[in-house]
Image (cartoon, grey):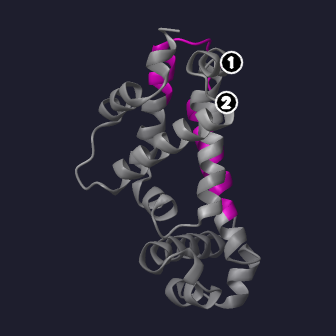
Amino acid sequence: MDVRYVRAEDAITKAFLKLVSDIGFYAITVKDITDLADVSRGTFYQHYDDKYALLNSFEEKIKADLLAALIPGRIPFKEDAVKERVIRLFTYCEQNLYMMRALFGRKGDAEFQQRMKDMLWEEVFAQHINYAGLTKKLDIPADYLREYVNSSHYRVFQTWLEKDKRESPEEIAEIYLKLSVISPVKKF
């Protein structure tokens, strides 16, 4: 691959993340990105159709990276398996903190965040929760239970991302499991 192409790609993605952090996804224009990246609009368009395509490239990268880290074979329910996945999730986030803070922070794209939240829920937690059993025991419709637990998990994740002094991936995994509906599942 051409070194100039790679350098331009790197400059574009770094500029994009900085702008999302500084002014927010919705306020960004292609001109903002090209000015900060010091590339021409033509160069930008060689890489992406628009800022949404650029955001989509991050989504695909994060999804692929997380799925590779989280699913080295599907494991039947065991609390340790869930804990291991949560540790891997937060380890990835810690290693890619700048990107994660920009994209999942308050100035990121809400639709992107929702898609990623849903994907993470399905890949990390949902397969380990017996919704039929829980909804029957708790007398709560499954869609409400799912949304409640998923939103709670996501807000804990965002709170952790925003902190300057964050817990380690192992510590936040413990917190997650204590807060989650996964622990009460064993009682049902």
Residue under the image location 30 percent in, 31 percent down:
171
Relative to 67, 173 lies left or right? left
Q: Toward the viewer: 53 or 77?
A: 77
Span of residues in magenta: 56-85
Relative to 3, 52 lies left or right? right
CB contact under 8 Å: marks 2 and 1: yes
Residue under the image location 44 percent in, 52 percent down:
96
Amino acid type at image mark 1: Ala
Q: Circle 2 sits on which residue?
A: 142
Q: Is residue 160 above or below residue 144?
A: below
Q: Circle 1 sits on which residue?
A: 132
Total marks in image? 2
Q: Secondary structure at mark 1?
A: helix
Which quarter of the rendered picture does the N terminus lie within? Answer: bottom right
Helix, strand or loop for the magenta stretch, by majority: helix
x%, y% of residue 117?
59, 47
In reply to whether residue 102 is colored magenta, the answer given is no
